[in-house]
Image (spheres, helix red, strand yellow):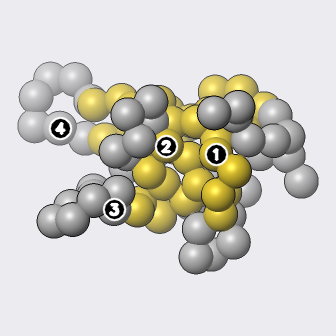
């Protein structure tokens, strides 16, 4: 099955605008067997199912990742990005 190459993760903030983070498909899979996506820094990581369900993953110690309001696919592809 092909998964989108990237998603926008939209987080609600207390300010006027929501916080948007773009994550890209990696070659890794999460605990649920779905692909792991991460941002350019490698700090924001999320396992995203084909139904758009998001499981955030900590990339370092003492993180408490928030769950986004929405995961919006940006493009459709079939494989991981080239690192």
Is residue 9 in view? no
Q: Which of marks 2 and 4 is in front?
A: 2
- The structure residue drawn at horizontal position 63% and vertical position 33%, both measured from the top left corner, is 83
Percent coordinates x, y for residue 62 in the rendering = 16, 65
72 sits to left or right of 5? left
11 sits to left or right of 30? left
Q: Mark on residue 26? A: 1
Identify whether 58 is placed above or below 2. Answer: below
The first of marks 1 and 4 along the sequence is 4
Which quadrant of the structure image shows residue 76? top right
The first of marks 2 and 4 along the sequence is 4
**Alpha carbon separation for disc pair 2 and 4:** 20 Å
- The structure residue drawn at horizontal position 85% and vertical position 40%, both measured from the top left corner, is 78
**Alpha carbon separation for disc pair 2 and 3:** 11 Å
The residue indicated by pointer 3 is 58
**Alpha carbon separation for disc pair 3 and 4:** 20 Å
The residue indicated by pointer 4 is 13
Furthest-top residue in this view: 16
The first of marks 2 and 3 along the sequence is 2
Asked whether the residues under the numbered discs 1 and 4 touch, taking CB atoms below 8 Å apart as contact, a structural biologist would say no
């Amino acid at each position: 099955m092909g998964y989108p190459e990237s998603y926008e993760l939209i987080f609600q903030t207390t300010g006027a605008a929501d916080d948007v983070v773009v994550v890209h498909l990696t070659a890794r899979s999460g605990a649920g067997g779905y692909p792991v996506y991460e941002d350019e820094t490698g700090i924001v990581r999320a396992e995203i199912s084909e139904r758009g369900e998001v499981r955030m993953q900590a990339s370092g110690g003492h993180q408490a990742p928030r769950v986004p309001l929405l995961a919006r696919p940006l493009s459709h592809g079939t494989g991981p990005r080239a690192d």
